[in-house]
Image (cartoon, rainbow, N blue to C red):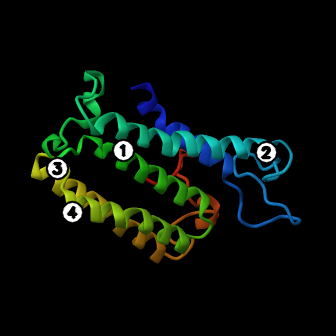
């Protein structure tokens, strides 16, 4: 349970360690979290390797482990919170793992893709298969939850397209869209 709760904060930490400004200054790119650190040079190169390993092992490995733990036989009662509500008769206990991968993909799209149009394209590449899978498999036992999840994915897709259509800096005070691309006022990723 602790790993499930810590999944998104750890994925966000790994992505933050790789997030560099896309415009070089003096031929060097700098880390968004600390502008005194040049990206992928010196100590940051080691940190980037660690962040990549974290994203590969935890970001992908944990959902794969969930699928393996939940797909066959009778899972441990302590894991029930992960599949409660999914259609167990059709063997869809593991569906939560797809949600984790979708969240990781959206965080990576928001933080690592440099411009708004490419972020929208990356988000669609994450959300379109999720929408297809949701409408194809209807993983929840209750139809209202299937409808709600479908509408949620559609709303995320609509929101990404709406954000791309807004001109940079429109409706904002200060530095415009480039000043806080991919961030909320609290400093965390804007998506999901």
**Residue that carries the numbered disc 3 in the rendered image:** 145
Mark 2 / mark 1, whichever is N-terminal? 2
Query: Vertically, is 110 above or below 167?
Result: above
**Residue that carries the numbered disc 2 in the rendered image:** 44
Describe residue 64's horizontal placement relative to residue 176 as left or right: left
Mark 3 / mark 2, whichever is N-terminal? 2
Mark 2 / mark 4, whichever is N-terminal? 2
Residue 66 vs residue 108, the one in the foreground: 66
Residue 119 in view here: yes
Residue 124 vs residue 91, the one in the foreground: 91
**Residue that carries the numbered disc 4 in the rendered image:** 136
Q: Position of residue 84 (x, y in %)?
A: 20, 35
Q: Tell me which residue sits at (45%, 77%) in the image.
A: 165
Rounded to the nearest whole Å, what is the CA distance between mark 4 and mark 3? Answer: 14 Å
Rounded to the nearest whole Å, what is the CA distance between mark 2 and mark 4? Answer: 43 Å
Circles 1 and 3, Cβ within 8 Å, touching? The answer is: no
Residue 176 in view here: no
Kindly state the secondary structure of the residue where label 4 is placed.
helix
Mark 2 nearby-residue class (10 Å; few <14, some 14–19, many ≥20): some
Rounded to the nearest whole Å, what is the CA distance between mark 1 and mark 3? Answer: 17 Å
**Residue that carries the numbered disc 1 in the rendered image:** 97
């Amino acid at each position: 349970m602790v790993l499930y709760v810590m999944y998104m904060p750890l994925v966000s930490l790994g992505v933050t360690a790789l997030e560099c400004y896309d415009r070089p200054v003096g031929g060097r790119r700098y880390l968004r979290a600390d502008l005194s650190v040049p990206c992928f040079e010196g100590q940051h190169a080691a940190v980037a390797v660690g962040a990549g390993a974290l994203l590969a092992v935890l970001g992908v490995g944990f959902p794969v482990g969930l699928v393996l733990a939940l797909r066959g036989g009778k899972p441990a009662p302590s894991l029930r919170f992960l599949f409660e509500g999914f259609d167990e008769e059709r063997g869809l206990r593991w569906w939560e793992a797809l949600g984790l991968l979708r969240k990781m993909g959206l965080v990576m799209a928001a933080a690592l893709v440099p411009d708004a149009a490419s972020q929208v394209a990356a988000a669609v590449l994450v959300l379109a298969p999720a929408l297809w899978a949701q409408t194809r498999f209807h993983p929840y036992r209750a139809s209202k939850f299937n409808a709600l999840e479908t509408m949620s994915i559609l709303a995320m897709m609509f929101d990404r397209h709406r954000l791309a259509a807004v001109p940079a800096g429109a409706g904002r005070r200060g530095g415009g869209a480039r000043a806080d691309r991919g961030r909320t006022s609290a400093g965390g990723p804007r998506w999901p």
